[in-house]
Amino acid sequence: MKRRERKTAKRKWRRRVLLFVFVCIIAVGAYAVIQYYQGLSIAKKGPYKDDGATFIPFEGSEPQFGEINVLMIGSDTRGEGRGLSDTIMIAHYNQDTHDMKLASIMRDTYVEIPGHGMQKINAAFAFDGPELLRQTLKQNFDIDLNYYAVVDFEGFSKIADIIAPNGIEVDVPHQMSEGIGMTLEPGEQVLNGDELLGYVRFRKDADGDYGRVQRQQEVITKLKDEVMSLQGVVKLPKLLGVADPYVDTNVDNKTILTIGKGLISGSEHPMETLRIPVDNSFWNARTDAGAVLEIDIEQNKQALHEFLSADTE
């Protein structure tokens, strides 16, 4: 083959490769868009479908040293305004180690809420949304939060069904029925989205909120593992569409992609969990706010700081 013919053949080969790559990009983009709108059509309704949240601006700090803290709030609006923060969590992600951690703050923890005095911590969200809850956590535990995400419980079951359409396997310790609108029988079984919601919300037993926090962390850990699988990654566009009307967040798309890519890279890392207050650092009390958990602030502040900062290489 002559030199000129070799150059011509090489140019044709490069054009074909570029065309193939371009077609793949278009196909992936089209798939993502279609899946996103399919997810959106499944959700249809939700308190945040029109970006109509009335929260005051969230004044979170900029992430430092590649560490990101997201305030995660589970809210039960039942169609009636803001609702209470039944679930309060801090999701911590380290961009260098790809470690992810989850700290749960029990809803009845008795703390100083700026401008409102001593209250149960879940009242902060009802008073003034994620920003006041951020201020409360900063004042009591000296924790810097960068972003927030409020998830309406109605959307949780829909999100879970997209992530794990075949359900999540759990071991129900005993019959659960009161306050969750269904009956879950004891034993190992696979639960769908609605059943999982009942499982993580139940607290009418001897374990009360302690057991509920444990079950919430268990289910979130299992859902995270499902998302990080190959099948889960493919479902991400549809998942975002389903979640959109039920989630209000200030996490930008770039940060979401950064965390997502990092979690996939470090998917072999198990997610660590912590409950605040920690053992032997609290006692039951009754105040004007009702039955509360009085806590040793310094002991819990230290435990939370050590948990969030002890990233492994």
Image (spheres, rainbow, N blue to C red):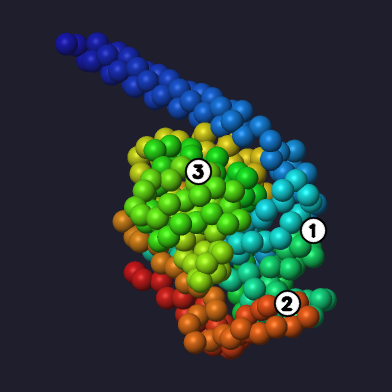
Q: Closer to the camera: disc 3 or disc 1?
A: 3
Q: Which residue in the protein does label 2 denote?
A: 290
> For the residue labelled by badge 1, is the local secondary structure a helix, a strand or a loop?
loop
Seen at 49% across and 87% down, the residue is 280
Hey, what amino acid is under mark 1?
Ile
* Amino acid at the residue labelled 2: Gly
Task: Determine whether the residue tagged by mark 3 lies in a helix, strand or loop.
Answer: helix
The answer to whether residue 264 shows anywhere in this view is no
* Amino acid type, label 3: Gly
Q: Quadrant of the N terminus?
A: top left
Q: Nearer the viewer, residue 80 or 229?
A: 80
Q: Distance between the residues labelled 2 and 3?
A: 32 Å
Q: Residue furthest left?
A: 1
* N-terminal-most mark, 2 or 3: 3
Front one among 307 and 161? 161
Foreground tag (1 vs 2): 2
